[in-house]
Amino acid sequence: EADIYQTPRYLVIGTGKKITLECSQTMGHDKMYWYQQDPGMELHLIHYSYGVNSTEKGDLSSESTVSRIRTEHFPLTLESARPSHTSQYLCASSEGSGFGYTFGSGTRLTVV
Amino acid sequence: RKEVEQDPGPFNVPEGATVAFNCTYSNSASQSFFWYRQDCRKEPKLLMSVYSSGNEDGRFTAQLNRASQYISLLIRDSKLSDSATYLCVVTLHYGGSQGNLIFGKGTKLSVKP
């Protein structure tokens, strides 16, 4: 039973389109994260948030942006998708320091 | 030096084998430690936390050596369903990125019949 939800699961879209990847959690967690992961490769942190109106860039530079207007919702937006954005995007949330993360099922994005 | 280092594998073992994964971390102030499991094309899932005294969960045993900054995961009597990538994870509870988990690149395990 998932407490963190990502939509869509799969997205194929043309170059230049604006896209928003949705992430919602029902656990009341303040901390939320976005990771990018290519097949067989390591996780790269691209954005994180410690609460409403708090967003920070992660270790990997990304052309995406995020917002955190509500605790439960942490969407990621690409203003103009490019083939180089093709990847899996994973959202996660955490109860706080010292606790592990719960990941969503991911969005597999393909930009053609 | 990477903050969390793991042997990438792959480890190819027969069913029933015992396999051990090792991991080292660079920041001696790290305070919490975990092993995650990630199946192919799926999200990572928490396998177990790692405690200073070592801990066991069924066929899985995790050990932590703070002096050597070393974490291990032992899988006994391996099953086909254990095939996955195992991620070593550490975190600091304070500082600029307080609580952010630091993931290793993962060690791939393939259990064969």
Image (spheres, rainbow, N blue to C red):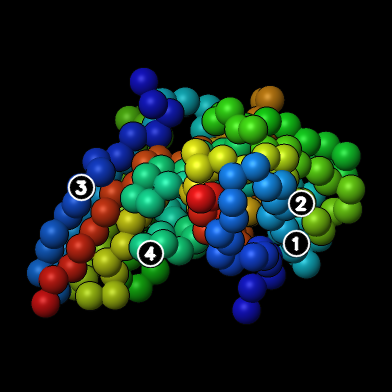
Q: Amino acid at mark 1?
A: Ser
Q: Amino acid at mark 4?
A: Asp
Disc 3 packing (10 Å; few <14; some 14–19; many ≥20): few
Structural distance between the alpha carbons of marks 2 and 3: 34 Å
Q: Earlier in the sequence, mark 2 or mark 1?
A: 1
Which of the 4 image quadrants contains residue A93? bottom right
Q: Chain of mark 4?
A: B
Disc 4 packing (10 Å; few <14; some 14–19; many ≥20): some
**Residue shown at 41% from the left, 62% from the top:** B41
Whether residue B94 is situated above or below residue B85 in the rendered picture: above
**Residue shown at 19% from the left, 59% from the top:** B19
Structural distance between the alpha carbons of marks 3 and 4: 15 Å
Q: Amino acid at mark 2?
A: Phe
Q: Which residue is mark 4?
A: B39
One can see residue A96 in this view: no
Q: Position of residue A35 (x, y in %)?
A: 57, 45
Structural distance between the alpha carbons of marks 2 and 1: 6 Å
* Residue B81 marker: none
Do labels 2 and 1 touch, CB within 8 Å?
yes
Whether residue A56 is situated above or below residue B84 in the rendered picture: above
| Nearer to us: label 1 or label 3 | 1
Q: Position of residue A17 (x, y in %)?
A: 68, 47
Q: Secondary structure at mark 3?
A: loop
* Residue A24 marker: 1
